[in-house]
Image: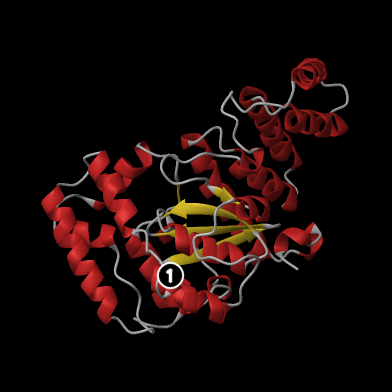
């Protein structure tokens, strides 16, 4: 049972502080990505878990309004109805509920609901240019083309074997950086060559080398500038992992082949959603492996390679 599943009175002071820390981080994320409904859902539940009902209702209102803007009227309806259970005399919500019911009726008459007319599966919740979704669930996993091959969940040993020959996402990252002119071609090629050599020579007990880290090390671009450039040109969520108190037991929920081998680090769990930091958000095979191993919805976050390496060092006591 996770902290989010327990009654408030059974949550320790330490756990409450962790949830408050999560809230602070995710409030920042929603300011940068106000239509990130998955993050809003997590925020709402986090506020509920520590008994801040007023804040939970406020986030629920933001969620409802966002769902309306996205044309997801069924989801908006549920949020407005939930608010009315707490505030039954709220005239604004009553009016909004009437509006969403009318739009829902119209959309049902016209056919399936749309998501801003883009025809995107609502289970994805958010779209990332060039890469797919920020949110991976069991439903989306089942409908996507498998990169690793095979159907259904795999155990850790099978994942390790299949990842051995799978693409590591470096080429996709190179294409993205080249397309958006974030790094010069000569620096990219030199950095990629060095990273691939280091990763070929690394032992299973040591962390993988990061392309972003190598580019920064070569002095071609400042780390903050490079990460901001990636974020500005995509819809990736960012997590300042260096400010997060990560539970090493959560990190160890994934095997070393993913944490050390792919720099993929789980850092928090709220209800059925696991938040995971990645050094390379284009590592599609690594992401698929995570989803096949975990019985959680997953929310992906880009983090600086240095902060991920620090978490791994703390987790495996390697300094």
Q: Name the secondary structure under disc 1.
A: helix
| Disc 1 packing (10 Å; few <14; some 14–19; many ≥20) | many
* Residue 224 visible here: no
- Rendering colour mode: secondary structure
| Vertical arrangement, residue 158 with respect to residue 87, above or below | below
Residue ID at (61%, 77%): 155
Image location of residue 255, percent across then percent down: 52, 77
Residue ID at (69%, 29%): 72
Quadrant into which the N terminus falls: bottom right
Residue 283's quadrant in the figure? bottom left
Residue ID at (33%, 72%): 208
| Vertical arrangement, residue 235 with respect to residue 218, above or below | above
Image location of residue 128, percent across then percent down: 47, 41
Side (left or right) of 186 relative to 254: left
Quadrant into which the C terminus falls: bottom left
Q: Nearer the viewer, residue 45 or 54?
A: 45
Image location of residue 171, percent across then percent down: 30, 56
Residue ID at (30%, 64%): 210
Residue ranking furthest to the left: 186
- Residue on which disc 1 sits: 311
Side (left or right) of 189 relative to 279: left
Q: Nearer the viewer, residue 75 or 3?
A: 75
Image location of residue 275, percent across then percent down: 56, 57
């Amino acid at each position: 049972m996770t902290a989010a599943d327990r009654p408030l009175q059974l949550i320790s002071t330490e756990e409450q502080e962790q949830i408050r820390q999560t809230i602070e981080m995710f409030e920042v994320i929603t300011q940068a990505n106000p239509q990130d409904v998955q993050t809003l859902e997590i925020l709402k539940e986090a506020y509920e878990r520590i008994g801040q009902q007023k804040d939970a209702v406020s986030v629920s209102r933001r969620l409802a309004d966002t769902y309306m803007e996205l044309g997801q009227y069924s989801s908006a309806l549920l949020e407005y109805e939930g608010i009315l259970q707490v505030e039954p005399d709220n005239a604004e919500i009553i009016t909004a509920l009437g509006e969403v019911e009318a739009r829902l009726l119209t959309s049902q008459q016209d056919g399936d609901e749309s998501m801003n007319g883009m025809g995107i599966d609502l289970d994805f919740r958010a779209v990332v240019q060039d890469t797919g979704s920020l949110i991976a669930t069991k439903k989306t996993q089942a409908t996507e083309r498998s990169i690793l091959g095979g159907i259904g969940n795999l155990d850790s040993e099978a994942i390790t074997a299949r990842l051995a020959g799978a693409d590591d996402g470096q080429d996709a990252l190179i294409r993205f950086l080249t397309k958006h002119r974030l790094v010069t071609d000569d620096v990219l090629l030199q950095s990629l060559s060095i990273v691939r050599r280091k990763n070929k020579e690394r032992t299973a007990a040591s962390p993988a080398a990061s392309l972003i880290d190598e580019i920064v090390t070569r002095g071609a671009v400042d780390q903050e500038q490079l990460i901001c450039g990636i974020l500005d040109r995509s819809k990736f969520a960012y997590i300042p992992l260096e400010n997060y108190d990560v539970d090493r037991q959560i990190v160890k929920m994934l095997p070393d082949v993913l944490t050390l081998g792919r720099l993929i680090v789980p850092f928090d769990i709220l209800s059925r959603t696991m938040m995971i930091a990645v050094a390379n958000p284009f590592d599609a095979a690594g992401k698929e492996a995570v989803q096949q191993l975990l019985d959680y919805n997953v929310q992906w976050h880009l983090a600086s390679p240095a902060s991920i390496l620090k978490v791994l060092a703390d987790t495996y006591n390697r300094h």
